[in-house]
Structures are given as structure tokens and as C-alpha cells.
Image (spheres, rainbow, N blue to C red):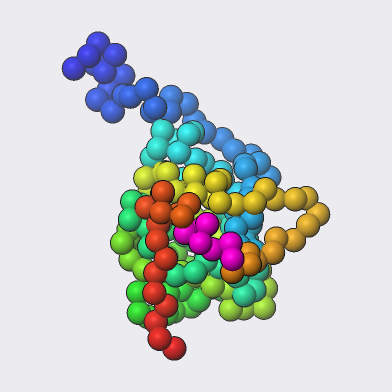
């Protein structure tokens, strides 16, 4: 054990945050991803890699394609609206106030099948997948609406996702 570790505790590391993180309302980096709006409140950089925490607005008809995270667990809490959730081969509807936990390695997606924008907060643990949003997302433009991406954009998105342990999953036969 080093001198620094003895004085700071056994979890001390150069990346370990040494103070409280406070991100006021309306702050955080905001990007558009395939029609959705994501604001990163806590990232790999400011949590020492422990978690990433984000806000999301998902318009009707939007949400990510079925996919798998190999390196992190995902959890979200639905603040308003409703989302159809794919869990491997089954789907269910999450409503305002519902919590959803997705272990790494599970094929999943959410889709807003309602009439109103769904709002949620979610996190990844450990952090790192927030880098996908920053690299793949389009900078949000004040006063504008995000648009779903054209189909020809998805091979590039899959390539970016692969760098972060993400791959497209299979939708069940309908």
C-alpha cells in the first residue's frame, strides 16, 4: 500500500472524484441521436469512470434499434410518457414512474409508441458508453427539432457502437 493510499483509503486512484459533482438544471452536453435528445449530466470524465447519467426526451415513434451492450449495465426511470420495451424476445410497456434495469449482454430497446414525448433519466455502469453518444450524436441546435437518421447513416453508427462494446440486436419476428 502506498503512502497516498493509506491516507486516502483503499479506493484512492488518480481518476477518483475528490468532490461532489453538481450539474444544475439545464446544463450538460446535449446531443441528438436518431430523433431523440440526450443530455449527459455525469460522464466517464467527471465520475472517474464509475457511471454515466443522462436525461432523454424520446418523441413518438423514436427510440433506439434493438441492441446489446457488452461492457455495461443500463438502467432507466421513466419520468413521463410510456415506452414499449424489448427484453430479448418479449415486449412490455413501461409507464411514468417505472424503473427498468438491463443487464449487460441482453438484447433490448425502447420505443415511444405513445402520443406524447417520453422523458426519462438513465445511467450506465460502469461509465464509458457516454462516449458513444458524444461521438455518434449530432450537436443539438436551439429552437430546432431533432430528426431521425436516414438508413444510410446506420452502418457508420454500428461502426462507432462497436468501438464501445455495442452491437445491433435482433427484433423478434412479428
Asked whether, in this view, residue 94 is left or right of residue 108, the answer is right
Give the dominant element type of the magenta stretch: helix, strand or loop: helix
Residue 154 located within the stretch drawn in magenta: yes
What is the residue that sits farthest to the top in this orientation?
A: 3
Q: Quadrant of residue 16?
A: top left
Q: Residue furthest right?
A: 143
Give the x, y percent position of residue 88: 35, 74
**Image height check: is 168 above or below 159?**
below
Name which residue lies at 49% across and 33% down.
Answer: 46
Could you tell me which quadrant the N terminus lies in? Answer: top left
Choose top left, top right, bottom left or bottom right for residue 161.
Answer: bottom left
Tell me if residue 160 comes above or below residue 117 in the rendering.
above
Residue 52 position in % (x across, y down):
46, 45
Q: Residue at x 74, y 61 (%)?
A: 145
Residue 133 visible, this angle: yes
Judging depth in this view, the residue of 136 and 146 nearest the camera is 136
Quarter of the image holding residue 23?
Answer: top right
Q: Quadrant of the C terminus?
A: bottom left
* Magenta range: 152-158
* Residue 136 covered by magenta stretch: no
Q: Residue at x 41, y 54 (%)?
A: 162
**Extreme bottom residue here?**
174
**What is the tally of numbered marks visible in this picture?**
0
Furthest residue toward left: 1
Q: Residue placed at 78% from the left, 57% from the top?
A: 144
Q: Is residue 78 visible to us here?
A: no
Q: Position of residue 102 (x, y in %)?
A: 37, 62
134 versus 74 height, above or below: above
- Percent of width and height locating residue 142: 78, 50
- Residue 136 lies, with reference to residue 113, above or below; the image says above
Amino acid at each position: 500500500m502506498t503512502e497516498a493510499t493509506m491516507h486516502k483509503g483503499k479506493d484512492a486512484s488518480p481518476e477518483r472524484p475528490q468532490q461532489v459533482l453538481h450539474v444544475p438544471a439545464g446544463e450538460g452536453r446535449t446531443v441528438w441521436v436518431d430523433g431523440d435528445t440526450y443530455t449527459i449530466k455525469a460522464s466517464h470524465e467527471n465520475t472517474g469512470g464509475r457511471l454515466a447519467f443522462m436525461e432523454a426526451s424520446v418523441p413518438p415513434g423514436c427510440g433506439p434499434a434493438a441492441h446489446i451492450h457488452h461492457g455495461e449495465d443500463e438502467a432507466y426511470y421513466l419520468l413521463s410518457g410510456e415506452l414499449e420495451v424489448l427484453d430479448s424476445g418479449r415486449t412490455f410497456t413501461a409507464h411514468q414512474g417505472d424503473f427498468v434495469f438491463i443487464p449487460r449482454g441482453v438484447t433490448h430497446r425502447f420505443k415511444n409508441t405513445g402520443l406524447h414525448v417520453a422523458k426519462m433519466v438513465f445511467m450506465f455502469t460502469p461509465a464509458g458508453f457516454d462516449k458513444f453518444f458524444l461521438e455518434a450524436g449530432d450537436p443539438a441546435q436551439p429552437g430546432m427539432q431533432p430528426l431521425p437518421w436516414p438508413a444510410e447513416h446506420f452502418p457508420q453508427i454500428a461502426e462507432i457502437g462497436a468501438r464501445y462494446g455495442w452491437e445491433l440486436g435482433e427484433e423478434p419476428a412479428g
